Image: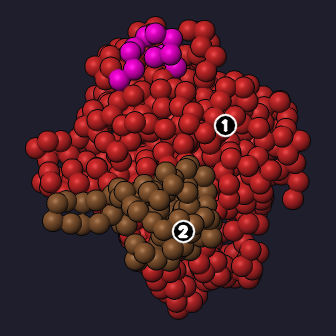
Chain colours: A brown, B red
Amino acid sequence: MQVTVHLHTILQRETPDGTIGRLEMSLPDESTLAELIEHLEIPLSPDHMILAVNRRMAELDQVLKDGDTVNLMPAISGG
Amino acid sequence: MANNIQNSKNQDFFSVWRINVRTQTFTKEQVPDTWMDLGGRGLLTQILLDEVPPTCEPLGPYNKLIFAPGLLVGHMLSSCDRISIGAKSPLTGGVKESNAGGRTGLQLTHLGIKALIIEDQPVEPGFWLLHLDADGARFERADEIVGLGVFEAAPPLLDRYGDKIAIALIGPGGEMLLHSAGIQNLDKDRAPTRIAARGGLGAVMGVKGLKAIIIDGATGAKPPIADEEAFRTARKAYTKALLDHPQTKVYHDYGTAAMVKMCDGFGGIPTRNFSSGSYEGSEKISGETMRQLMLERDDECEIAHACMAGCIIQSSNVFGDEDGKALVSPLEYETIGIMGSNLDINDLDTIARLNWEVNDLGLDTIEVGAALGVAADAGLMEWGDSERAGELIDEIRQGTPLGRILGSGAAITGKVFGVERVPVAKGQAMSAYDPRAIKGTGVTYATSPQGGDHTCGLTIRAKIDHLDPSVQVEVSRGAQINNAGYDTLGACAFSGFGFSLAPENIAALLNARYGWEVEEDILQVLGRQTIKLEREFNRRAGFTKADDRLPEWMTREPLPPTNAVFDVPEEDLDSIFNW
């Protein structure tokens, strides 16, 4: 299945082509959010992240579906 | 709370400075016992309850303008030198506290001022400077700077009084008594950029005939500390907790603009006058883009900037133009949301220029941005027409009837132009979180005695389903109590992630500072006490349950893309303060 992942602020990736904040990813069916995070080798504890799938707060054990949009956001408390 | 010896030391150091602007007289009074254990937002609310008739006319002689530094102010403790400014609000008709960083809190405290109370109204028309130093207070004419924007008015004052001073001043908006006018304070670099923006306090200062308050704290002294060693230990532990927290790096590197994509990610970013919660241009106005631009432009750009001396978070910034020359400081999420996506303006340079204009006028960017959104809905500007937005802001500067309407805020603009979609609570514009998508923050907007204001209890950080109406009240309650506590300490909300990991540091700092023996829950004790006082003021001013509601259209009009409405039950809203 395909999912879109948005990496916010300090989770963005520096590449030779520039800073990448959005990834289109292929994952095995039935993958969970925790597996996605592990696969991406995110260097921040989930305790310090806000996780959203399709604009709703999500838990680590949420099973992802084809076409989902995932936001991985280092937690901040306000603006 | 205090033991007798320490109480006496603080009684000796602190006093209440009372200024009468009609007689231009000054008295220095002993701090009443009931005020001694309070500071900031809690203290000024107690003073309002004790001294201001809640039903008074906010721009009349019985209202008082109060400056109260928080309990921890005075020691350059990171992010803990904020000043609370308050009065009965001309915008909401209720209690108002608005706080700011910068130099004002620290320097008032160094003069031993527990509270500065400004009373009455001048007989003669015109504006004055109020000068405060260790010798007392004096009035001088402000003729040379009357009518000037804050960025033109501050430098001659620094030339005249020296660059060690703090200044709290109003812009043309405050002189015109506009309900969106705030009070601007010098930051650590002496720029008048730290605004106590909300609720029209600049109009209260304007009607009292004060263009600027000059505070020469260098003539004073640091406040006493009961146990120096314990204070050093607590400061070290707090600073370490703050430095170790991952949020510090995010705020340092991206500022509050990091919130653009987060709020958009939840479908809650205000777009085209709160008609959508997702903005197609969010990437272009994001914190990530802003950081990249500042790295490329360099020169005068500062990605991380402290508004108060000693702050280690440095979430502020100096945003520069294409040539790297400073456009505005700071460029923050709330302004990007309300004057960017909310007006369909997707260009940070343009938002920064509009932001500077509104700052120079001494107005609240949230209130003015919301008013412009309502004006656009009324057909006064096309979405995304930044040139027209600039013209409308210039109408405010010229003081035209249209400008005065816009400068009076979103609620009045909506009434005059017949627009129902007006994003206000208690008459005050909401911040850049649509309450239908972030419902806990909607509960805060509805029930906070302050009106629509995210700083009273933002809930977007909470790990809850923001769309589920059944779980919002508890989260809002906790956030409101904690924020009222921080505002009473004089602590920036962002100090909260240092304190949240080690809440014992708050009690340790207070105990060391004052010789108290308070427990770990002191933040909540102060927060609950403050909200209780505020609600009592509003009750006496005539507020009822009917005022603790969001606008009806937000309960009817679904917000794309989540299509959520605000559906937290009214009985839940009414139970929020039953603790």
The answer to whether residue B536 is above or below residue B175 is below
Numbered circles on residues, count = 2
The chain carrying label 2 is: A
The answer to whether residue B394 is visible is no
Examine the structure image and report whether residue B380 is included in the region drawn in magenta. Answer: yes
Q: At numbered mark 2, what does the secondary structure look like: helix, strand or loop?
A: loop
Q: B247 or A30, which is in the foreground? A: A30
Q: Give, as a three-letter code, the residue at label 2.
A: Ser
The answer to whether residue A43 is above or below residue B265 is below
Dominant secondary structure of the residues highlighted in magenta in the image: loop
| Numbered label attached to residue A31 | 2
Q: Residue at x 56, y 61 (%)?
A: A64
Q: Position of residue A45 (x, y in %)?
A: 50, 77
Q: Which residue is mark 1?
A: B564
- Report whether B220 appears left or right of B148: right
Q: Are marks 2 and 1 in contact (CB under 8 Å)?
A: no
Q: Which stretch did the figure color magenta? A: B374-384
Q: Residue at x 60, y 9 (%)?
A: B418
Q: Position of residue A68 (x, y in %)?
A: 51, 53
- Nearest to the eye among marks 2 and 1: give it: 2
Tell me the quarter of the image containing the C terminus of chain B. bottom right
